[in-house]
Amino acid sequence: MSITYHVLPGGVLTGEIEVPGDKSISHRSIMFGAIAEGTTYVNGFLEGEDALSTMNAFRAMGVPIEGPIDGKVVIHGVGKYGLKPPKEVIDCGNSGTTMRLLAGLLAGQDFAVTLTGDETLLKRPMARVANPLSLMGANIDTESEGRPPLRIHASSSLQAIDYTLPMASAQVKSAILLAGLYARGVTTVIEPEITRDHTEKMLEAFGCPPVVNGKSISVEGSAQLKATTIHVPGDISSATFFMVGASIAPGSNLLLRHVGINPTRSGVIEILRLMGADLTFENESSVGGERVADIRVKYAPLKGIYIPERLVSLAIDEFPAIFIAAANATGTTLLSGAKELRVKESDRIQVMADGLLALGVNAMPTMDGMVIEGGMYHGGVIQSHGDHRIAMSFAMAALRAQGEITIVDCQNVATSFPGFDELAKAAGLNIRLT
Ligand code: S3P
């Protein structure tokens, strides 16, 4: 069923809200809990469609999982070699993380599995995981140009590799490390840029700390995981829509409670601060190796900046929202070095440029980024192309538009942020759904 957002112009974001649990950590809690020895308890789990796709995949492979109930999940781990062949093809839905990390985890099992997904996922590149996994001895078929479905054949003899990633990708890194848990020897992945390190942190929480040396991460094939308790913080990627909304709407003062601020994820904070945003951390603490804080956001006039390339991989999911901040800034914002944005749930460079142009913003897409001139913009109709983050970003843009913004194809917001519209309305956004 297709959902359309109608967002009236104006509004102020105030009060205190809590965004749902971190998507990346939620996926990993199920995967690691499933192959650990013992019972893993998760709280704060994201009850969004993507994380539920991962949960369903492991249920289909015989892992008893209770919940989610109010963010609580109990996983009765079956151990590294306890997964059972699924009776059917595994449907990863819209979730690239499910498909890529599962490809790694299943590459070394002694049974065959097929991974498929929705129309969007079937267009996304998978050779980036199939190639290194093949080097380890896995036998994986893809459709033409490395697209899904992925047919993973049985293989119980993976070899460790040393692999330099051709692109900054935490999903590819994690897929290889997960396969490395089943390989003979020590598997090492070298990243071109630091990317989110939730897999490394979770390996440590499950009793198998990887050896991390700058951008090089190594795991032992003989590692055994021991069950633990995982506290999932609020997702900084979901909090970003509200950080941008409150930064651009005069009079806003919003507290986002208990958000994960892992330094490999918090590039958006630095980018928005460089633009002049008023963001402060309150109640900073550490939960299970992940840093968390309440984030207070107050309206502040923003200015255009050249976004430092070193921050790109630390804010990779936040650019749709950052582009909205740029449209509201004085002067020009320039992003480069971000061609990975073209292979996300949509081509986020093109789709964001099209949407901004539809509102009258001067936006120029480039091969690996965008140039945006801030200024006034009118309302209009936005095609989100089924991309959750495009939909939520343009919803926030309405706070400063001069007319209603209508966003079509918003149903996939439920993949990462169930309840976005109610929470946004409670904070002050004038949003209605049809
Ligand atoms: C993710 C890694 C990123 C990110 C995605 C989640 C993860 O993808 O865009 O939303 O959980 O590892 P890439 O690895 O493709 O950059």
Image (cartoon, helix red, strand yellow):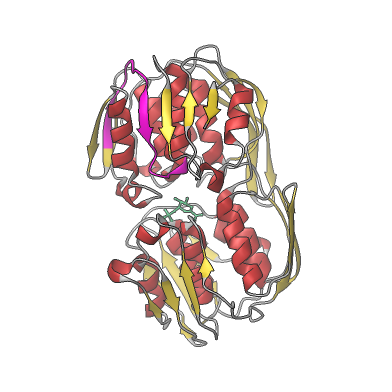
In the image, residue 41 above or below residue 86: above
Q: Is residue 201 visible?
A: no
Residue 220: percent from left, percent from top: 55, 76
- Picture coordinates of residue 322, whole percent (x, y): 41, 32
x%, y% of residue 248? 46, 19
Residue 327 visible in rendering = yes
Residue 37 horizontal side relative to residue 340, left or right: right
* Left-right relation of 102 to 259: left
Q: Position of residue 70 (x, y in %)?
A: 75, 46
421 to 227, vertically: above or below: above
Q: Quadrant of residue 242?
A: top right
Give yes or no for residue 381 being in the magenta stretch.
yes
- The residue at 56%/60% (across/down) is 199
Q: Residue at x 34, y 37 (%)?
A: 308
Q: Which residues are magenta?
A: 370-388
Single out the residue that lies furthest toward the top: 251
